Amino acid sequence: MQPLLHHCAFRQVVLLTVGIVLMATLACGSAAQPDPAPTPEPATSASADSPATSDHGHDSQPAPDAPSQASSDEIVIKLPITDRSTTLTRDELQVSRGDTVRLVFEADEEGEIHLHGYDLTTAVSPGHPGELVFEADAAGAFGLNFHVFAVASSEPATDNHGADAPQLVVSETPVSVAITAEPDAQGGVDVQIVAEGFRFAPELVDQPHTPGAGHAHIYVDGVKLGRVFEDQYHIEELAPGEHEIRVSLNTNDHGELTFNGEKVDSTLTLTIPDVGQGHGDSQSGQSHDGHGHSHGTPGEREIVAEVHLGNLEVYP
């Protein structure tokens, strides 16, 4: 009987041991299973630098400091007009297409500024500057003309606006001038000036005389149109018929140069053909400068001269 009890106890111990071993094996087996595949991480900030796809194009934003193509600085150009002329050079009358341009005019006479091409005008008079503000949306060269106003009078216009004749200054060195002129298709005239022993010096205007330097004065039918600071000048819209064009060489202080006892000037007579530009009907009078502007009645404002100040050049 006693051996049987020992056998049963031993069997229980064996079963208990096997159970413990099985439980340990199952626990170890479950721990040894491989981990599941990692879940993909969401896109980080670095991925925002990659180009946006068509699905997310609406979420893209421009760079905060990207320049605006529509914005541009205002270009201010001041044109002082003295003695029917300005000292501004061609380089100072250049802008770019798309610029906002402000042209400021100060004049010693009453008149009107006309910017051709853009067809803009502004009144100007002593102490009352005129301004033209616009966007330069058309490229090209556009003429700036000063229409000089005066009270109608039966007296003919004189040089230097009724002042005394210019002082004659003897040139210390040989100097000469010659001119040619060609009508254009619009009834205007292109004048070419060839000066020998002389240079145009706009930077010295109104200063004391410098030998061999200065500017020119241009006249049509005895009326002064203005000063010339380069070797060419464009006269706007002369009326059909004959006109006398004269160019003189002058000192910085506006004296007329002479050499060998003769004025240093050049004169020619030019016939402007009738090209049907509509210079007014036959009842209209012609101003003394030969331009196709009609006089007003006595006591009213009239145009006595049309001065070409230069061309505003707009580059693409």
Image (tube, rainbow, N blue to C red):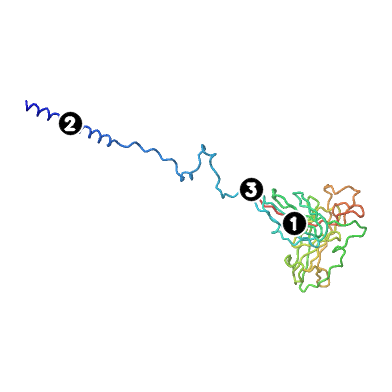
> What residue is shown with label 1?
104
Residue 238's mark?
none
- Left or right: residue 91 compared with residue 126: left
* Mark 3 / mark 1, whichever is N-terminal: 3
Q: Can residue 268 be seen in this view?
A: no
Residue 301 picture quarter: bottom right
Please provide percent x and percent y for residue 49.
Answer: 48, 45
Q: In this view, does 35 lie above or below 122?
A: above
Residue 226 location (% of width, % of height): 80, 61
- The answer to which of 102 and 281 lies nearer the viewer is 102
How many residues crowd around disc 3 within 10 Å: few (fewer than 14), some, or many (20 or more)?
few
| Residue 16 disc label | 2
Which of the marked residues, 1 or 2, is nearer the chain's N terminus?
2
1 vs 2, front mark: 2
Q: Do labels 3 and 1 touch, CB within 8 Å?
A: no
Task: Report whether 19 appears left or right of 292.
Answer: left
Return the residue at label 3.
Answer: 70
Where on the picture, by quarter, is residue 22? top left
Q: Closer to the camera, 230 or 243?
A: 230
Give the CA distance from mark 3 to mark 1: 24 Å
Specify whether 7 is left or right of 200: left
Measured in 3D between alpha carbons, the distance from the residue under mark 1 to the one under mark 2, in whole angstroms, is: 111 Å
Q: In which quarter of the image is the N terminus?
A: top left
Q: Which of marks 3 and 2 is in front?
A: 2
- What x and y, as percent, mark residue 242? 86, 55
Q: What residue type is labelled 1?
A: Val
Amino acid marked by disc 2? Leu
